[in-house]
Each structure stands twice: as C-alpha cells, then as structure tokens.
Image: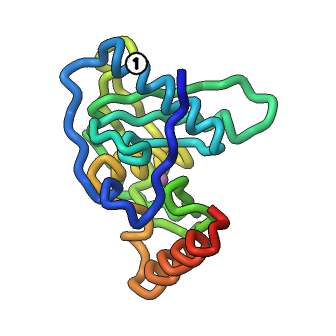
C-alpha cells in the first residue's frame, strides 16, 4: 500500500467539494488504508480525501496516534453527515496537514452526531465531543472545500497563508 502525498494550500483541490461514494468497496478500502498510512506518517490525527488529491467523500481519523504507546484506533468514514450539533460551543486550537505548522483557535459546536458508512460498507453513527468533535468537523469541512483558516479573521487568515507561501518559497516544505 503506497502512501499518498499531502497537498498543501493554495492548491485548488482543497477548495473543491468531494462527491459521495456509491459504496465502500475494495477500491475505497484500499484508499482508506493508504490515507491512514499517509496520516500516520505525517503525523496527524485526521485526513480527508481532498488532501491527497481525491475528490470522494472519504476521511480517516485516529486520535490515539498522537500519544506514544497507545494502540491505534482508526476511524474510517465515507459520506459523513452531521445529523445533530450542540448549541454549546467549544474553542480549541487546530492545525492542518495542508496548512503546515500553523495553528489557531477555532470555534465549533462542542458536540456533534455524525452518520456515515464505515470500512465494511455498514451505516454507522458517531457521537463526538472534545478533540474528536473538532477533528471530525474539520475533516468534513475539507470534503466541502472548507479550511479551518476560513473561521479566522481576514487578517489572521492572510497571515497564515503568507507564512505558508514563504515556507514553500524557501523550500522548507
Ligand atoms: Ni485539515
């Protein structure tokens, strides 16, 4: 299984809307596994298809991977849909593998319930709060061409974009 290359801003694929998958078949499973490997290698806790240049509604997450020694606990989602969100708001620092080394506080619903199709093509639901809630909302945003910097002030957003451009120019990335 060959890992993918992670695409960074300002690549337009990050601004496109991904299409639903008809079903999670062997091809989609292979994509999910390769995305997970890519995410672990980065390392990150979430990755959406747009970030590897694919425009189907697939994402992977593993919050356990951020702690050393913890057993992997991957979550694979196809066609994720937020079916409920709390009125309560949560503010948490977010980063993104497509916006390297930049972090900012983002405000989101504190809890969400997500309906999706799992690795075995079964319908499933996840209720998420805390970091998992931020992560799943962040990844679903990717599938709609939305980035976490879109929630920031124009000033802060432009600052982050400029910093990444500069890093790319200096070929640090
Ligand atoms: Ni991201």
Q: Horizontal placement of 36 versus 84: left or right?
A: right
Residue occupying image coordinates x 23% and y 18%: 23
Q: Is residue 135 above or below residue 157?
A: above
Q: Is residue 14 above or below residue 113?
A: below
Q: Which of these two is toward me, 56 or 151?
A: 56
Q: Position of residue 31 (x, y in %)?
A: 41, 26
Q: Secondary structure at mark 1?
A: helix
Q: Position of residue 94 (x, y in %)?
A: 55, 60
Q: Which of these two is toward me, 107 or 33?
A: 33
Q: Position of residue 49 (x, y in %)?
A: 38, 40
Q: Which of these two is toward me, 166 or 70?
A: 166
Q: Which of these two is toward me, 99 or 74?
A: 99
Residue occupying image coordinates x 56% and y 59%: 95
**Location of the N terminus (image quadrant):** top right
Residue identifier under label 1: 29
Q: Horizontal placement of 98 versus 53: left or right?
A: right
């Amino acid at each position: 299984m060959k890992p993918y290359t992670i695409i960074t801003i300002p690549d337009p694929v990050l601004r496109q809307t991904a299409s639903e998958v008809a079903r999670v078949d062997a091809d989609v499973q292979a994509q999910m596994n390769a995305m997970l490997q890519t995410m672990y290698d980065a390392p990150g806790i979430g990755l959406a298809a747009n970030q590897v240049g694919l425009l189907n509604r697939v994402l992977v997450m593993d919050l356990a991977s951020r702690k050393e020694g913890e057993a992997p606990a991957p979550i694979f989602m196809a066609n994720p849909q937020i079916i409920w969100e709390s009125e309560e708001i949560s503010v948490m620092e977010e980063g993104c593998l497509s916006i390297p080394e930049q972090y900012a506080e983002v405000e989101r619903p504190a809890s969400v319930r997500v309906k999706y199709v799992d690795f075995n093509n079964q319908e499933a639901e996840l209720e998420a709060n805390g970091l998992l809630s931020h992560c799943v909302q962040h990844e679903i945003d990717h599938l709609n061409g939305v980035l976490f910097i879109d929630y920031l002030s124009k000033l802060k957003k432009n600052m982050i974009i400029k910093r990444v451009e500069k890093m790319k120019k200096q070929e640090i990335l």
